[in-house]
Image (cartoon, rainbow, N blue to C red):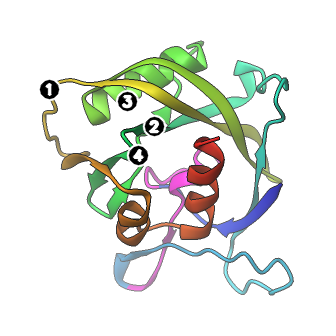
Amino acid sequence: METRVKLGYCRWGYRKCCPWHFARQQDNDTIRRQSSLDTNQKEKTMSTQYTCRFLENNEEPPRKETISAVFLVAFKDGKVLSTQNERGWDIPGGHLEGDEDPFVALQREVLEEAGTVVESAKPYAVLSSSTSPKVMLFFSSNSITLVEFIPSEDVLARDMLNPEELLSRYYGDKDLLQSLIERGQK
């Protein structure tokens, strides 16, 4: 199953590195996310087409050299691990550093952002762009341990939210996140 999303610049200001957090600079330096699942609609803004593809049962994830960022859809007692930043609520994750292994990067980012230890996780979705060879890899896990959470400038809060609650608070493409949650639970 593929979901197509049109987006602009990421939260760090990079054009091609991070499709999950893409936002586009608008009038008066305010950030407004641009997204559309209607691939027939003509875009009048500079945007890029992204595709979310779910991995088949035994399919290998992309090579680590092609992965720019990793994210975790983690479940515990029917709730989803969620973090709050300046834009709203999201799932934890971030960029790989150097030659870092994707799972090691996932563990590091989730511990840094959410004060959560990931014991195991399975890669299950890839977000790719037609303009970049880099992709984002999404992992799913039911094996997490919440440890001390320390709010920071980048992450204001952590919570375990029901999927519906996370979707209502989420600032991004709700259809894409809902697909990721539904497939991650399987």
Q: Position of residue 137 (x, y in %)?
A: 65, 35
* Element on which disc 3 rests: helix
Label 4 and label 2: CA atoms lie apart by 10 Å
Q: Which residue is drawn at 84% across and 23% down?
A: 58
Q: Quickly name the residue at label 4.
A: 78
- Identify the image quadrant of residue 37: bottom right
Q: Name the residue under label 1.
A: 148
Q: Which one is earlier in the sequence, the residue at label 4 or at label 1?
A: 4
The residue range painted magenta reads: 11-27
Q: Is residue 174 left or right of residue 151?
A: right
Disc with the residue nearer the chain's start (2 vs 1): 2
Which label's residue is closer to the chain start, 3 or 1?
3
Q: Which mark is residue 74?
A: 2
When the figure is inspected, residue 46 is found, relative to residue 95, above or below; the finding is below
Tell whether label 2 touches label 3 (CB within 8 Å): yes
Q: Where is residue 135 in the image (x, y as percent from the top left)?
A: 71, 39
Q: Name the residue under label 3.
A: 110
Principal secondary structure, stretch drawn in magenta: loop
Q: Quadrant of residue 173?
A: bottom right
